[in-house]
Image (spheres, rainbow, N blue to C red):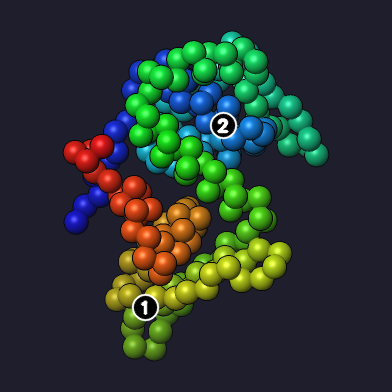
Amino acid sequence: MMRKMPFALTDKTDIKIFILYLLMHIERPVDFATLHDIVVQDEFVRQFDFMDCFYELCETEAIQKSEKDGREYYAITPKGRAAAETLQSDLLRPIRERALRSALRLLSFQSRGTVIRSRVVALENGKFQLECECRDSEGTLMQTSVVVETQRQAELMKYNFDDRAELVYRGILSLLSGDMNYLADSWMSDDEK
């Protein structure tokens, strides 16, 4: 079964409000890569649209840049907060809520200093094993492996794990605990939204 593309925001004003809404609710400065991941991870905003709108928000001083330990961080300004509070009702509530849940999960995963490791191992029987691990300062959070038929399949799975390890981790927790709502929210089709 092929995954359907979720509803995508296309209007620049909606995308800017969406970015400001997320920044307003995470309530702390984030680096550019984290902000990018937060905004595009649920595919409501395309990467190019994010970049375009992000720089416009910086130019209009709705987002401000600060530096700490040689890194740049971004936060919402009072001007940006006023715009987000006034206009957020224009965004569909399920989109706002799902994106905020995803953003908070991602930040929680990152704030724990989680280290992600994965590798593909060729097996003697011609199959390939993908080994995945998530560790933080307290030890191993998750360690799993799966055997697949082809190296291409294993490399694709490795890429997806490396790109979205937090989602894989949460998905495994959800499956093992019987909480299918997380998975349903993550894979909801356009027709269901």
> Can see residue 161?
no
Figure quadrant of the C terminus: top left
Q: Secondary structure at mark 1?
A: strand
- Which amino acid is tagged 1? Val
Q: Position of residue 153 (x, y in %)?
A: 33, 66
At 28% across and 46% down in the image, what residue appears? 188
Mark 1 or mark 2: which comes first in sequence?
2
At 66% across and 55% down in the image, what residue appears? 112
Q: Position of residue 50 (x, y in %)?
A: 46, 28
Query: Which residue position is annotated with label 1?
Result: 147
* Label 1 crowd bin: few (<14), some (14–19), many (20+), radius 10 Å: some
Q: Secondary structure at mark 2?
A: helix
Query: Which residue position is annotated with label 2?
Result: 25
Determine which of the numbered discs, if any, sits on residue 123 in the image. none
At 24% across and 43% down in the image, what residue appears? 189
44 displayed left or right of 190 = right
Which residue is farthest right?
69
- Which amino acid is tagged 2? His
Q: Nearer the viewer, residue 173 or 75?
A: 173
* In this view, 60 is above or below 118: above
The CA span between labels 1 and 2 is 40 Å
* In this view, 79 is above or below 43: above
Res 175 → quadrant: bottom left
Q: Position of residue 19 (x, y in %)?
A: 50, 26
* In this view, 15 is above or below 45: above
Mark in the foreground, 1 or 2: 2
Res 190 → quadrant: top left
Q: Nearer the viewer, residue 171 or 45?
A: 171
